[in-house]
Image (tube, helix red, strand yellow):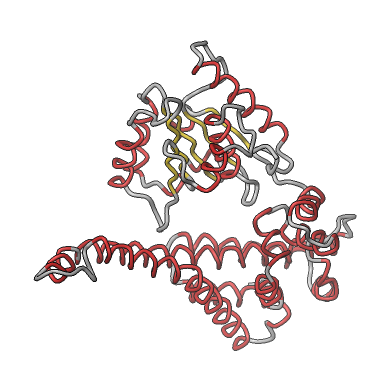
Amino acid sequence: MAVFDDLVGQERSVETLRRAAAAGAEILAGGRGAGMTHAWLFTGPPGSGREEAARAFAAALFCPDQGCGHCDVCHQVAIGSHPDLETVRPQGLSYGVKDTRQLILRAAGAPTLGGWRVVLFEDADRATEGASNALLKAIEEPPPRTVWLLCAPSPDDMMITIRSRCRAVTLVTPSPAAVAHLLATRENVPPETAAFAARAAQGHLGRARRLALDAEARRRREEVLSIPASLTGLAACVAAAERLVKTAEEEAAAVTAVLDEAETAELRKVYGEGSTGKGLNKGLVRGGAGALKDLEDRQKSRATRTKRDVIDAALLDLVGFYRDVLTVQFGAAVEPANDDRRADLEKLAGSSTPEDTLRRIDAIMLCRRRLASNVNPQMAVEAMTISLRAPRL
């Protein structure tokens, strides 16, 4: 299985990347390598596989066979251990200029294995203005064998000066049929479950995989999609908001707890906790107090980011639900993404107008913008649930 095979429904982008990888191999052999450039911007909707495409391209650049998928080099890229691949995953709400400058210094080093040095920057849109300016200078004057792979939802999320210096790879939302086929053939998911997960995830491969394989993910989805029918009064709206935010907090805690524990234990070990020798343990742990405080701050920021990401995913599920209501109201010949809740869709469609549904969708999108602006999640979600109950002003 080649490294590009998991990029479902991205045939045009895969062809572009294959040609660029071949050009990269030509450059390493002393040729011109037309079609290869030092900076790439991968964009596309959530679940389209931006990071996966960038990682596959990195493997194709490193691999002697341009991404065979089964050699040691491809395996190293897949697990993140290749010495010439620097992967950046912003854990907090933003990625600052200090971190970016350190990244640029690391990226300036010569390749260890004599080929390329690749920086894969996931969620590059989280870079602050200062970080973006520092990144721009690095992209304008890169070392000869350094390749930058930036990932963002859309080109507009990046500074115009950065995106003008990058070659664009625009990914699309894969069809539910393509996602279902992948789940059935690669994950051995029963066809009915694969079709349900692909339809419910609306082309988001990662979410479809979780829905197909994780019963807890399916349960959380059911809780979110039960919200519209539960909004019978003001108290119910407040309770629904509290339930959604609490669920997000619990999921975020579960995701980050294991990471936090491992990181903290490793840092304490580095600074000598548990070492023997007179005065050694105490002195080194005290010397690492500042590093431990910095780690705790980063972990808190990551927990906040994870919580907001979980809430945002729930809000997108609600948007999909009301979009299905709208298709029922207009009698559109489209299979609803949430066909398993057909009764709720038809009931709400019959008791409201298309204008009501559009206002409800607007309320959800406003909540997303408020959360992105650091509004208190409980307040933002409460305002949304109240608007979902009575959209008319």
Name of the residue lying farthest toward the left: 278
- Give the position of the N terminus as an image quadrant: top right
Residue 242 in the image, given as x and y percentages of width and height: 54, 81
Q: Is residue 18 left or right of residue 124?
A: right
Most extreme residue toward the front, as rendered? 277
Side of 245 relative to 352 (left or right): left
Q: Viewer-proximal residue, 319 or 53?
A: 53
Residue 208 position, x and y percent, is 71, 59
| Residue under the point 61% across and 43% down | 44
- Looking at the image, which is closer to me, 69 or 307? 69
Q: Horizontally, is 136 left or right of 333 in the view? A: left
Q: Against 344, is 169 above or below?
A: above
Name the one closer to the observer, 141 or 390: 141
Nearest the eye: 197 or 170: 197
Q: x%, y% of residue 316?
A: 64, 62
Residue occupying image coordinates x 76% and y 50%? 182
Tell me what residue is drawn at x 51 percent, y 42 percent: 76
Q: How many marks?
A: 0
Quarter holding the C terminus?
A: bottom right
Dividing the picture into quarters, in which one does residue 290 lie? bottom left
Provide residue 53's location: percent of width, then percent of height. Answer: 60, 40
Q: Residue at x 34, y 61 (%)?
A: 298
Residue 41, above or below 177:
above
